[in-house]
Each structure stands twice: as C-alpha cells, then as structure tokens.
Image (cartoon, rainbow, N blue to C red):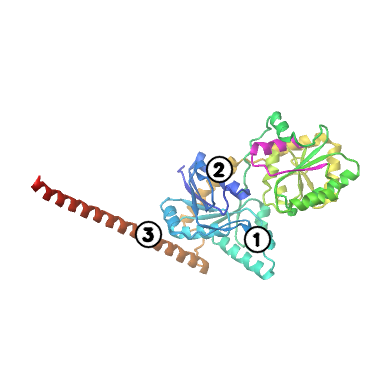
Amino acid sequence: MNKLKVCLINDSFPPVIDGVANAVTNYADIITRSHGEATVVTPYYPGADDGAYAFPVVRYPSVDMTRLVGYRAGMPFSSQVFQQLETAGFDIIHSHCPVTSTVLARALRERLHVPVVFTYHTKFDIDIANAVRSQMLREGAARILTQNISACDEVWVVSRGAGENLHKLGYEGDYIVMPNGVDFPRGRVDDALVEQVTADFDLPQGVPMFLFVGRMMWYKGIRIILDALKQLSDSGTDFRMVFVGAGGDKGEIVAYTESLGLAGKVLFSPAIRDRNRIRAWYCRADLFLFPSTFDTNGLVVREAAACGLASVLVAGSCAAEDVTDGESGFLIEENADSMAAKLRQILEEPEMMRRVGEGAQREIYVSWEEAVSRAYERYFAVIDNFRRGMYPERDKFSDEFFRGVANVMDIGVRSRKLQQQMVQQIEDQMNADAMSSYDSFMGRMDRFL
C-alpha cells in the first residue's frame, strides 16, 4: 500500500484545546507514525510551539477575535502559504471545520487537483443559535455553511446523530459515519496515582462517587444532574459528585449547586490537561453521568469505558449510540426524575455498575489507532473515486469564486517567484560586476608591483 501525503486543516490546534483540535492532533500523529505523512494547516497563534510534533505544522495569518468569539480567526489567502502547500505533493485534503478551513481546502483543491474530505464534528445549529439572534441571519449562516460542506467531495460525520443534525441544518447530500477514537488505552492507572489525584477531595470509601468531565455549560445537561442529585439527597442517600472542567457557565452552576444545598456532596475540580490524571478520576468514580444531547460523539463516554466505567446517558442522544441499556451503559429520559430513578435502581445493585462498566469497555471503546486506520483506508477509495470522476463537477458560483481565488493565489506565487528570481539576478550581476572591477583593479596594480 502506497504511503499518502495528507493535508489536515482545522481552525483550532494546540495551544487551543478542544475536541476537534484533539482529533486533528491524533490524526496527524497516527498517520505520521503508522501510515504515511501528515501536515497540519491551521491559523497562526502567538507562542505556539510546533517544533514538538513529529509532523509539520503550517500556520497562516490570523486575526485576534478572542474577545468577540473566543478564538483567533484565520485569514487563509496567503500566497506564501499557498506556495508552501502547493509544493508539498498532497494526495488528499481533510478539513475538520466548515468555515475558514474548508474555504482554504476548496481553494487549495483548485491548485492541486486532489479531493477534499470534510468531517462534521459539532452541532453547528446550536453554535449559530448561540452566536446569532436574528432568525434571518441564522438561516443565512446555515445556508453558507451547508453550501461550503456540499462543495466537498466526501462528507464524514462522527456519529449517526451528527449526520441527522447536518441534514437538519440543510445539507442534502450523503455522508459516511466515521467515529472518532479515544487516546486512552484499555485498563486502569495505578491506585497510587488515583490516591494522589483525588487526595484533596472528601471522597469517603464506601460512598458512591459520580463523575462528570467536560465543559461546564448548561447545555451539557448539568441541570438534570443537579436536580436528580437533589432528589437523592432529600431521600437520605449519601453520595459524592465531582465535576471536572471549566466553562462559561461554571459560576452559575456552582451557585445553583449551593442553592440546592448540595455544596458538601457536589465538588468541583478545574479543567485537567494531564491525560493520566483524567484517567485517575475515571478510575476512582463508580458511575459517569453525561445526560448531554448536545455532543455529537461523546468521547468522554468512550474515555470512561476505557477505564471500565459505565455511563448514564439520554436514550437517543449521540453519546448513547451503540450503548445497550443495562449491558454497556444506562439509558434515561431527558429529565431529572428519570435520572434520579435510574440512580436509585443502580445503587440498589452496586455490582451492576462494575458489570456494565466491563461491558462498556468491551463493546463501545474505540482507540484512536482503530479510528484513524479506518479513515486512512477510506482515503484511498476517495482518491480513486476522485480520479475516476465519480464526484460531481464543481460548477456552482461559489466554486467559481474559489477557482478565481486559487488563480489569484497562483499569480501571487508566480509573482513572488519572479520577484525572487529578479532579486537573485540583480545580486548575481552585482557580484559579477564587483568581481570584474576587482579583477581589473588587480590587473592594473600588477603593473606596478
């Protein structure tokens, strides 16, 4: 099997940390280590240390918009970056964001004549709704987004629910489910690490401990967790609940916890970057609570499964895909009463938590090596389909625009090359003239020496 050169493009990459940045990092690392060659293309970020990676990272200009939207917005139309990418010899382009990244991917496709794959990771209808108040503007933003996605040669989604959400957004094409993986190995960390990581928290032995890991945002279903725990507390059930993470709603969540009288039983930890320390929390917990209907893949559920920890999930959510109630997880309705009832049932049979945790580890765990290997194998089919002309011709106005952008970039690249050649010629001529003058001077001096 020939080794492919893969161009991975995304709007976020370390030091920016989010689920998609983590996915791109794992794609690049595993492709480079086990399959072929990968290059990450992402916006410039001050202080980024890209030299630590085994694969090249190409940064293009960006604008600081962290005060407005929380990140730097990329400006991908740089002739210098295009020149660098055009000479890399990519076989395929894989975009992980439907905005700037896919704009760059489409323009680059026109220069390289290679296919573009797009992966849909996030429910963008929710992101659009949170960012735009006007219904008309929301519809316009969704239309632009789906047109950009539709222009890609093949579309992947990380779960069936993500695909349904993409169709809800207005996308009418086909897609392939290509799940993400987990960077945890199967199994537990040492008990000594568990004790060290959890030492500062009041976690009595024999008292059930529940866990949540992720962004501290209400849309993650956190209110359902707290209201359910309030019911357990009022009925006299002792427990501990630990939230690990940071987010814009954390202050409100802590305040709501205190208003429910749960401050002694519900504990909060800052976000943790060290993956082994996160694993330690999964290994200490008895049950993972994740009633989110926002997430498209629920990787934290697979992380918990890697450690033999079962999850309580909303039936029909993306996070609950491939989970069988009572065998590889526990399913509830999307409300606090249902969660409280399920927790009471589970606590009456504590052995069930261990058994279902083992089932989760066996049935729903997927490593990043497995996930990327599957994607890499699919790359070959995409390239073959593209070369055989099986993907529709790009004849929309927007594609004409990007074709024009690519041509402008080509002119810029050629102009830069011509400028460099002219400068080199001038330098060469100046050097030649200088040497000629020097030789003439020395020849004259020889007459007197």
- The location of residue 240, given as percent across then percent down, is 81, 40
Secondary structure beneath label 1: helix
Q: Earlier in the sequence, mark 2 or mark 1?
A: 1
The amino acid pointed to by label 3 is Arg
Q: Nearer the viewer, residue 388 or 361?
A: 361
Q: Which residue is mark 1?
A: 167
Q: Which residue is mark 3?
A: 416
Which residue lies most toward the right here? Answer: 235
- Whether the magenta-drawn stretch holds residue 276 is answered as yes
- Viewport quadrant of the C terminus: top left
Q: Residue at x 46, y 43 (%)?
A: 3
The span from disc 3 to disc 1 (Cα, nearest Å) is 43 Å
Image check: 355 left or right of 277?
Answer: right
Q: Residue at x 55, y 56 (%)?
A: 154
- The location of residue 87, given as percent across then percent down, is 41, 52
Secondary structure beneath label 2: helix
The span from disc 2 to disc 3 (Cα, nearest Å) is 39 Å
Which residue lies most toward the front here? Answer: 448
Which residues, given as a range, are shown in magenta?
Answer: 265-285
Q: Indicate which disc residue 210 carries.
A: none
Work out whether residue 95 can be spotted: yes
Q: Which residue is mark 2?
A: 373
Image check: 207 left or right of 151?
Answer: right
Q: Earlier in the sequence, mark 3 or mark 1?
A: 1
Q: Is residue 429 above or below residue 136?
A: above
Q: Residues within 10 Å of mark 3 (few under 14, many from 20)?
A: some
